[in-house]
């Protein structure tokens, strides 16, 4: 098949590109490179089945042509990362909502199946753990722009489901839970690459808050094939599905595990949220997915442990650090 991947030069997108090329598919990547980077596609940059287009997802002329020429759309283009969301909330809301609307409108126009990437942030401050797809959503006040991302992605889901029900579009929605792996950037608040880079440089590992908040991290190599499996499964049309790992770890324990792998003189330092982000910043204490629905519908089962994944990331970041030093 021929896939169009918006945001395909990003972290998750680049791994899906690699997976699809290995399966003998043709892939067209559209990315405006605002947060993505063509270096992420370096392992496959010269592949004969890969084509790249530098443009915004809101460019309807370009998008219309690319959608008409593809068999499937994987829509990943979005503003990502807590820091970017706080620093540029207008861009966050605009690109997330209007970009998804563009993908869905063109999927309808050309009768193409479309995958919509959502996020565990949608669950907000929900207290019922693990998070189940049909559970109520609890978001903070609109005065805290930290919640604009969650709200924009929830609106993306509502819009996708409306296109399914009203127009018969084949839309698939996945909520990603802290997907990690090599090539993820720490520039926009992603915790694991930030911790690893701090440790490799012998700098203090800065944990925001008291570090007792918990998260579940899933290797991108487990997530990438699950996205395609969703699109191959008729029962997942119009469904919202959690994709993640249900192994829960505190951020303090995460920092300690990374220190154990890297070694060296780094220590763990706690930074108040108001210093790391902004006064009144709100965070979720726990974020744990139920992956029963994914197991039932697509046979999803994470294969790579957190320790294995952290080792991969440390190896990748160490290699990149050595390259920077050589330059």
Image (tube, helix red, strand yellow):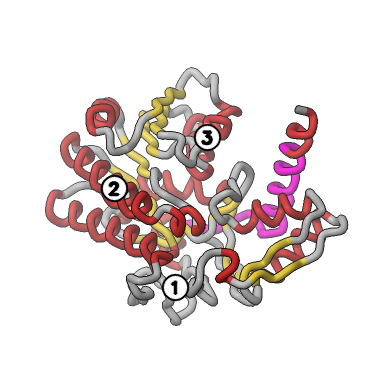
- Residue 256 among magenta residues: no
The disc placed on residue 100 is 2
Q: Could you tell me which secondary element the residue under label 2 belongs to?
A: helix
Residue 4 at least partly seen: yes
The kind of secondary structure the magenta stretch mainly shows is helix
Gap in angstroms between the C-alphas marked 1 and 3: 32 Å
Q: Residue farthest to the bottom?
A: 127
Q: What is the total number of numbered labels drawn onto the structure image?
A: 3
Query: Does residue 158 appear to the left or right of 241 in the view shown?
Result: left
- The residue at the point 57 percent across, 70 percent down is 273
| Of callouts 1 and 3, the N-terminal one | 3
Q: Which residue is mark 1?
A: 131
Give the percent coordinates (x, y) of residue 47. 52, 21
| Of callouts 2 and 1, the N-terminal one | 2
Query: Does residue 253 appear to the left or right of 156 in the view shown?
Result: right
Q: Could you tell me which secondary element the residue under label 3 belongs to?
A: loop
* Quadrant location of the C terminus in the rendered image: top right
Q: Which residue is mark 3?
A: 37
Residue closest to the eye, 17 or 105: 105
């Amino acid at each position: 098949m021929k896939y169009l991947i918006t945001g395909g030069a990003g972290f998750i997108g680049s791994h899906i590109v690699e997976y699809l090329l290995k399966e003998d598919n043709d892939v067209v990547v559209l990315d405006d490179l605002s947060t993505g980077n063509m270096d992420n596609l370096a392992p496959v940059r010269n592949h004969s089945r890969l084509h790249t287009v530098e443009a915004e997802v809101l460019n309807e002329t370009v998008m219309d042509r690319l959608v008409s020429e593809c068999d499937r759309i994987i829509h990943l283009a979005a503003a990502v990362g807590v820091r970017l969301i706080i620093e540029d909330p207008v861009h966050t809301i605009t690109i997330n909502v209007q970009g998804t609307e563009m993908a869905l409108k063109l999927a309808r126009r050309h009768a193409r199946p479309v995958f919509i990437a959502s996020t565990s942030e949608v669950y907000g401050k929900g207290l019922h753990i693990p998070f189940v797809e049909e559970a109520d959503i609890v978001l903070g006040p609109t005065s805290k722009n930290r919640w604009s991302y969650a709200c924009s992605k929830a609106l993306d889901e509502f819009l996708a489901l409306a296109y399914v029900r009203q127009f018969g579009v084949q839309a698939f929605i996945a909520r990603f839970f802290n997907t990690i792996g090599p090539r993820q950037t720490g520039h926009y608040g992603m915790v694991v690459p930030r911790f690893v880079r701090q440790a490799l440089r012998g700098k203090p590992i800065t944990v925001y808050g008291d570090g007792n908040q918990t998260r579940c991290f899933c290797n991108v190599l487990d997530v990438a094939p699950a996205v395609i499996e969703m699109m191959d499964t008729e029962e997942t049309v119009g469904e919202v599905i959690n994709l993640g790992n249900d192994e829960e770890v505190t951020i303090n324990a995460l920092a300690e595990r990374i220190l154990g792998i890297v070694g060296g003189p780094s220590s763990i330092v706690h930074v108040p949220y108001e210093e790391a982000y902004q006064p009144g910043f709100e965070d979720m204490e726990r974020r744990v997915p139920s992956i029963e629905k994914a197991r039932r519908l697509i046979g999803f089962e994470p294969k790579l442990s957190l320790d294995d994944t952290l080792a991969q990331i440390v190896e990748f970041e160490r290699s990149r650090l050595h390259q920077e030093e050589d330059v």
